[in-house]
Amino acid sequence: MSMRHALAVLPMSLAAGLVLAQPEPLLDYRDTAFLTGSAYYSQAERRQVAKAVKTGPEALVRALGDDFAILGDADGAFSAPGRTERIYLVQKRAPLAIQPFPDGPPPALVALHAGEPVAVYALPADVQYQRLVAAADSNGDGRDEVLLEASSMNMGQMIVALDAIRLGQPGEATVAQTLPEVYADACDNPKGAKTRRAATITVQAQGFVAEAHELGCSHGRR
């Protein structure tokens, strides 16, 4: 029996529920607390991350030095399917949104298991990220992609984009997908329309999907 015929014989209320069912949002940029949130790390956790950084490529270790920022973390399977790991975004310094082309050494993703180093993944050198916001498997290979946020501000407008980072062997990380405007605030636009849009992010068959929602300028701001 085809799926179309199967739906035809279901009770109308159940069939409607199947058609209308939507995946739960992984992220919701309408949430002011999420927009403004930042993680706190104890000195013990920072020491664990610093120890793991030292196992990375020599050039990266030298560029990051001993004084770097930890900009978010997530749990998941990163080095191999079925693993239980925690991954951190490590960067020389936290970037400013008013610098759309920030200068600094490449950031890195650092994976640990039970506080011990697993792998270090060097990220592209042409971007500085704002924070790590989530991890999820978007292609069904059993390894989680990592969602990293980058912000820029220009002429009264703020744009937030997400890069989905796919991890390979230790040291290898590539941008698998970019969601270009998950949050856009033009309420201080001096000439154009004053608008604000925020997206909900879901994982679907085609990967990460952003659904935009229009917000008024009176809505809570980042």
Image: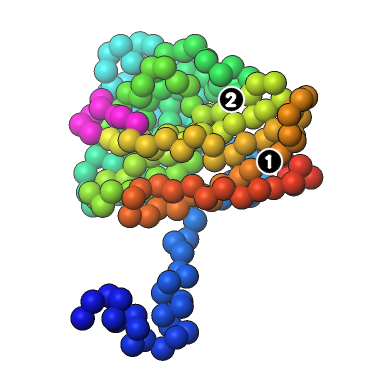
Tell whether position 171 is magenta.
Answer: yes
Which dot, 2 or 1, sits closer to the camera? 1
Question: Element under label 2?
Answer: strand
Q: Amino acid at mark 1?
A: Arg
* 61 w.r.t. 210: above or below: above
Does the magenta stretch mainly form a helix, a strand or a loop?
loop
* Amino acid at dot 2: Ser
Q: Which residue is mark 2?
A: 152
Q: Which residues are magenta?
A: 168-175
- Image position of 171 (left or right of 153): left
Give 64 or 165, whichever is nearer the viewer.
165
Count of number-bearing discs: 2
Q: Is residue 125 visible?
A: yes
Please name the residue that numbered disc 1 is placed on.
196
Q: Quadrant of the N terminus?
A: bottom left
Residue 48 is labelled as none
Marks 2 and 1 sit apart, C-alpha to C-alpha, by 15 Å
Observer-nearest of 204 and 50: 204
Q: Is residue 195 above or below residue 98?
A: below
Q: Relative to 104, does residue 129 appear above or below in the rendering?
A: below
Tell which of 40 and 106 is nearer to you: 106
Q: Are marks 2 and 1 in contact (CB under 8 Å)?
A: no
Q: Secondary structure at mark 1?
A: strand
- Choose between 212 and 47: the one closer to the eye: 212
Neighbourhood count class around disc 2 (C-alpha, 10 Å): few under 14, some 14–19, many 20 upward: some
| Residue 110 left/right relative to 211 | left
Where is residue 35 drawn, in percent x and y?
A: 62, 41
x, y percent for residue 38: 58, 37
| Residue at horizontal 43 percent and vertical 31 percent from the top | 89
Q: Quadrant of the C terminus?
A: top right
Q: Is residue 149 magenta?
A: no
